[in-house]
Image: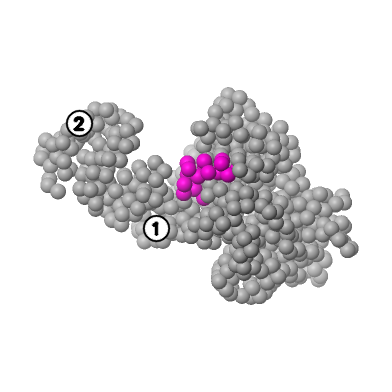
Amino acid sequence: MSTPNPAIIQSMQRASALLQAGNFVAARSLLEQVVQAAPGFVEAYRLLAGALLAIGDRDGAERSLRRAVAIDPNWAPAQAALGELLVDSGRVDEGERALRQAAAHGSRYPRATLLLVRLLNDLGRHAEVVNLTEASANEARADLDLLHQRAIALSATDRADDAIAIYRRLADAAPDNAGIEMLLAGALDSAGRHREAEQHARRAIANGANTPEARYLHARTLIATDRTDEAERLLREVVEARPRFADAHNNLAQLVWMRSGDVAAATEQIDRVLHSHPDDNALATIKANLFAAAGEVRAALASIEERAASASADVPVLLCASQNALWSDAERALGYAQRALRLAPAGALPNRAVIEALLALGDARSAVDGAEKQLRLQPNDQYLIALLATSWRLLGDPRYLAYCDYPGMARGWTIDTPTGWDSLPSYLADLRESLKRLHTMRTHPLHQSLRHGSQTAQNLLDVDDPAIRAFFPAIDGPIRRHIETIGHGADPLRRRNTGGYKIAGIWSVRLNAQGYHTNHVHPQGWLSSACYIELPRALAGDNPGREGFLKFGEPGYPTQPKLEPEYFIRPEPGLLALFPSYFWHGTVPFGGDDTRLTIAFDLVPA
C-alpha cells in the first residue's frame, strides 16, 4: 500500500476533526472523496464506515469495512471494526471470526482482544477468556478494561479469589480510584464475602463514587449482612433518583416481598414508574416474575402477554412469556422462545427456552439436538445436562441410565460430631438455634425453588458463629467419602472428580407447613446437597406419603408425557444428602404446624 500524498493526509485530518465534532454528513462526503482519490487507503475506509454508521447506513458501513479488509487483511483496526459491526448486527459467528483475526495481531491493536473477550464473556465462554488474557494479565501496564473482563471470567470459572486479586492489584496501584474500589466490592460480593464487600462499597461512596449504581451495590451487601432496614431505605433512594433502574427495582421488590409476603406492596414502586413509563419492558418483566414467584402463573402471563404479542417485544419479555405459557400452552411458549432466539441466536437463555418448550411438546429428538449443541459451548452447565438427560429419558435412550445412576450417585451420609460437642444431637441443637437467628425474612426469595418458607441471605461461610463454623469440619469427612465412592468415569459427574472440592455457595432454608422445593437443578454446581438440622413431626413414623422426602427425577417443567420421580431419600436429623447438581430434585410437601430446617450448599471440584 503506497503512502498517501500530503493533500490526502490533510483531508483525513479534516475528516477526523469533523467526526469528533459530530458533523458526520460532512465527514462522509469528504471521506468519499478521499477513497476515490486514494482507493488503496485502508484507514480512509474505516473512518468512512464510522461516518456511515453514525448516520444510520449500516449496510454502507459494512461495505466500506469489507473493502478495507480486502485491501489489507492484516490491518487489525479494520478487522476489529468489522467484527464489532457484525456482532452488533446479530451475526455473532461472523463477528467472532473477524475479531479473532484482528486479535491475532496482539499488542499491535489491543482493542481487538478487548472486543473479543467481551463477546466471549457475553456468550458465557469464560474459560476461553481466561486463556486469551493469560499473557496480557501479567504485563506491568495491563489494560484496566481487559483485566476487568479477565476478572469476570475468573469469577465465572470458580476462581473468585483470582478475580479479587486482580481488583486488589488495581486498587493498590490507584488507591484513590473509587471506581476500582467499587469493582473490588462487587467481586467480593459475588464471592459471598459480603462483610468485606460492604466495607469497600461504603469507602468507595465516601471517596466520590456516590452514584445510583454504587448505592445499589451497597444495598446488596447490606441485605447479605442482614441489615435489611438500611438496605430498603437505600434502595428506595436509588429508585427515586433513577426511576427506571431495573436491577434496583428488582432487589427492592424482592426485599419487600420476602419481608412481607405481600405482592401488592412489592410491586407498588414498580407500578408507580410503569404508570409514567408504560413502555418500560424491564420493569414489566420484573413484575411478571414476581407474580410467578408468588405462585400466580396466570397473573404473570396476563401481565406480560400483551407486550410479548407486540412485534417490538425484546428478549426478556419473550422469555418471560415463554416461561409462564409453558404450563398451559406449550405451543405458544415455543413461539415466544423461537422469536427470542431469532433476536439473540447465540443467547444461552433463548436456546434453553426453546429446548424446554420442545420437551413440553414431546419433541425430545429436537430437544437432544439443541441441548447437545449448547453443551459443546458449555460442557459443565448442569441445567443443560439435565435437559439432555430428560430428553434421553423420554426417548428411552440407555445413556440416561449412565447419567442418572441414582443409587450410585445420590446418597445420604451422617455428618461427624465436631470438636467441642459430646454428641451429634447436642451439636444439632446448637446449630439449630444459630441458624434460626439468621432467618429474618417472612417468605421465600424470587427465582428460587422453595415455597412457603425462608432462605438466609447471608453466605454461611461469612458468618462468625461457633456452631456454624463447626459445620464445615463436620461435613468434610462425609463429602470426601462420597467423592471417593462415586469414583471416576465418562459421565458429567465422574469425569470432573479430582478427589478434592470447594464450597461454591452455602445457605440455610426453613420450610413452614406445606412447604416444599419445586423441582430444580443447580446450574453452576457439581455436587449439591441437603443437610437436615431439624425435621417436622410429620416425617416421623411410617410416612407412606413420603412427606418431606427429597425426590429425584421429576423435571421442573412440563414434559410430554409427564415424568414422575424415580428415587427418594428420607431425611433424618444430621443426614447429609449429596447428589449431582444436574439431578432434578425437589421435596414432597409436609403437613402439621412445625418447620423443617436445613443447610444446603453446592460443591465444585478443587
Q: Please tell me whether residue 417 is drawn above or below residue 64 in the rendered image.
A: below
The answer to whether residue 334 is magenta is yes
Q: In this orientation, which residue lies closer to the viewer: 130 or 87?
A: 87
Residue 553 in view (yes/no):
yes
- Which quarter of the image is occupied by the C terminus? bottom right
Left or right position of 23 against 602: left
At 52% from the left edge and 37% from the top edge, which residue is drawn? 314
At 48% from the left edge and 38% from the top edge, which residue is drawn? 208
Q: How many marks?
A: 2
Left or right position of 74 against 316: left
Q: Residue 554: percent from the left, percent from the top? A: 70, 57
Circle 1 sits on which residue?
133
Q: Residue 174: percent from the left, percent from the top? A: 42, 49
- Kindly report the secondary structure that dominates the magenta region of the rendered protein: helix
Q: Amino acid at mark 2?
A: Leu
Residue 505 in view (yes/no):
no
Q: Which residues are magenta?
A: 333-349
Sequence-first disc among 1 and 2? 2
Which mark is nearer the camera, 1 or 2?
2
Q: Amino acid at mark 1?
A: Thr
Q: Crowding near pointer 2: few (<14 within 10 Å), some, many (20+)?
A: some
Circle 2 sits on which residue?
30
At 67% from the left edge and 30% from the top edge, which residue is drawn? 268
